[in-house]
Amino acid sequence: MLFMSPLVPSDLHREKPFRSETPSCFSKGGLSALKCEHDTRKKLTLTADHPDADHIGAGDSYDFVSQMGGYDLCAFAHVTPKRNGRHLITIPQTAHPSIQTDADILGWLVALAQESPVAGGLLSHAMNAGWRVMFSDLDNGSYELDVLDQRLELDHHGVNPSALIRSPYFRHELLTSFLQGLRAIWHEDMSGETIDQLRPDGFLMAARARQADIVTTTLLMAWELRASGYGDLWRHIIGSEDGDMALVFTRTLERDPSAIYSGLAMARAYVAWYQQPSRIAVCDHAALEYLDAVIAEDGAQALGHRSFTVDMAERLTSLPDNAGYMKDRGHEIINKPDFCAFQDPINEAHLFQVMYDSRVVNRGGVPFRDTKLARLIFPDSE
């Protein structure tokens, strides 16, 4: 078993790290991998003559929105549950007449988000920062952030708006992705550049902490929606892959109802995220793939050199009102094996390779680990 804090071999510790300015990026599954352009999007070829076309065809509206770059969230600032009617909170199984386009879907998402104080705060931040939202067939069931264009892309699963809103599974997957995307936007705007300055081992620790917080904060938002009368999302999460965290959350509240205010319920759910090795492995893999892309595009010198600190770990768990549910527990995230250990040997080997690459400088087509020596031998080479 390997811990991230001492994972760097001694010879790597002795070398001076490179300073860098890496483009800010994080996306899918919490790690907001920067994706300015998508290669190809799946497009259904169903026509109006097809008996199921009205039910599952994505239609032309999504392609149009894709070309236009999505919807400006500020345009939905007027949308409130009261103005649009409480019928938006509980969608019937049959098609709802007010949900026919992707703009209607986004209006429904915004209306629901405002039913949660935390989601409302994150939504206000995204609106003020000028973020846009678009629907795409991402084929990942989640979301992606385009940081440069400030765009949140939500996976519509290849179904049209009226069919999507009729499906309890699809609409709750979309709502979950929207809430997670709002939290990811908050992280990107508040700490994205700082995280990009971390050295590879610290970058992985920050990616874990960030993803754990995204899921934990989504639990809180779902719980607040439940208190507002929309309990369907909470039931959906209970049956999802993060249902174990939801159960920890509710069991804590059963024993101590005040834990929702003290942050204890969120803290225990946060810790539970790290107790599922598959979640950690997926997060680590996404982070390492991103570091590989940085090296391939900008060279090893683009990687960061800073350490992941206690203060950073605690700030990643701060809510819009500046309350941190892991306050004074950042040292645990930095030092305890439960948070730092590697359980996937492939990711462990991958990290060592990235760290080795981060210490290599190419001069005259020859790789060097000693920058001064490289400059002496190839003084005119870049």
Image (spheres, rainbow, N blue to C red):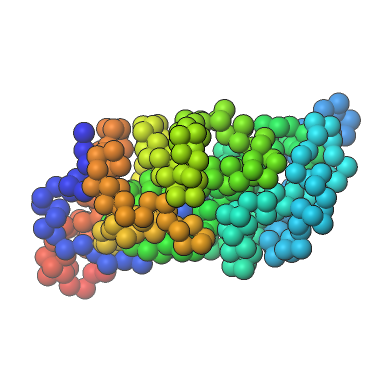
Between 117 and 195, the one nearer to me in the picture: 117
Between 364 and 207, the one nearer to me in the picture: 207
Q: Is residue 17 left or right of residue 104?
A: left
- Residue 70 vs 55, above or below: the answer is below
Please provide percent x and percent y for residue 143: 57, 46
Q: Residue at x 49, y 34 (%)?
A: 254
Report which quarter residue 279 is drawn in: top left
Q: Residue at x 27, y 47 (%)?
A: 332
- Residue 249 vs 185, above or below: the answer is above
Please provide percent x and percent y for residue 301: 28, 62
Q: Residue at x 81, y 44 (%)?
A: 87
Q: Is residue 346 left or right of residue 138?
A: left
Where's the N terminus, which quadrant?
Answer: top left
Between 320 and 190, the one nearer to me in the picture: 320
Report which quarter residue 374 is drawn in: bottom left
Please provide percent x and percent y for residue 29: 49, 43
Please provide percent x and percent y for residue 335: 23, 47
Determine if residue 29 is in view.
Answer: no
Determine if residue 135 is in view.
Answer: yes
Badge count? 0
Q: Is residue 372 left or right of residue 58?
A: left
Q: Is residue 210 left or right of residue 311?
A: right
Q: Residue at x 70, y 65 (%)?
A: 74
Where's the C terminus, which quadrant?
Answer: bottom left
- Residue 66 vs 240, above or below: the answer is below
